Each structure stands twice: as structure tokens, then as C-alpha cells.
């Protein structure tokens, strides 16, 4: 159907870095900012998919752990931005 049934989280870097380059449809939420209060913006059964810069970055792992500790469904996008680019997909810019 083309409907997105998850929230894609860009979990590293500053808002400025996110604005310059991110995966289309992503929401910028640093892993350090994943708190129960912040996550209340989404229904409890929302699936989150976290990604970071690439295989050299563990931000997605930290985000997944934070989300799991809050009882939120979560997956990690293996490869992050590096993997996205390796597959030939374009990035978005602008917040």
C-alpha cells in the first residue's frame, strides 16, 4: 500500500547534521533523548526502526536498547546511512 507502518529514527548527530543529510521519512531523535516522556508522542505499539551513520557507529544499538527498556518494539537498520548509500538510495535534506 505504500503506507509506512513504523517510525524511522535518525539517532545520532545534531539537528544541523540531520538537516543536511538523512534517510527520507526519518525523524531526528538522538538516542540520548529517548525517554518515556518523549516516546509518549507515539502509541505504545509503534514500531521504531533506528539507524545511525553506519557499521562504525553504535548509536542505533544504544537507541534500540533504550527503546527496549521502555517496552517499545524496535529494530535496527543494519548498515545505517552507509548501507543506504551502498544500495544506491538517495538522501533527503531539510528538516
Image: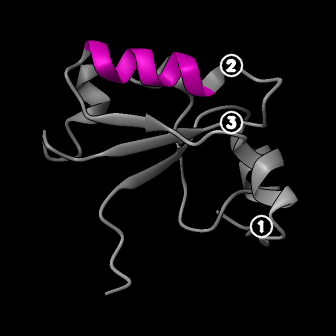
Instruction: From this view, report whether residue 10 is shown above or below residue 4.
Output: above
In the rendered image, the quadrant that contains the N terminus is bottom left
Q: Nearer the viewer, residue 28 or 9?
A: 9
Percent coordinates x, y for residue 70 in the rendering: 24, 18
Between marks 2 and 3, how big is the CA–CA gap? 7 Å
Q: Are marks 2 and 3 in contact (CB under 8 Å)?
A: yes
Determine which residue is flagged by label 3. 52
Image check: 70 left or right of 54?
A: left
Q: Quadrant of residue 92?
A: bottom right
Q: CA distance from mark 1 to mark 3?
A: 13 Å
Q: How is the image coloured?
A: one colour
- Residue on which the image places disc 2: 58
Q: According to the image, label 1 marks what residue?
A: 91
Mark 1–mark 2 distance (CA, rounded to whole Å): 20 Å
**Badge 1 or badge 3: first in the primary sequence:** 3
Magenta residue span: 60-69
Amino acid at each position: 500500500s505504500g503506507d509506512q507502518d513504523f517510525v524511522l529514527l535518525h539517532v545520532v548527530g545534531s539537528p544541523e547534521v540531520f538537516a543536511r543529510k538523512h534517510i527520507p521519512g526519518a525523524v531526528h531523535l538522538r538516542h540520548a533523548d529517548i525517554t518515556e516522556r518523549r516516546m509518549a508522542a507515539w502509541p505504545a505499539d509503534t514500531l521504531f526502526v533506528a539507524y545511525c551513520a553506519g557499521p562504525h557507529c553504535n548509536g542505533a544499538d544504544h537507541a534500540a536498547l533504550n527503546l527496549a527498556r521502555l517496552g517499545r518494539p524496535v529494530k535496527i537498520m543494519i548498515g545505517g546511512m552507509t548501507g543506504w548509500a551502498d544500495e544506491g538510495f538517495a538522501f533527503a535534506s531539510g528538516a
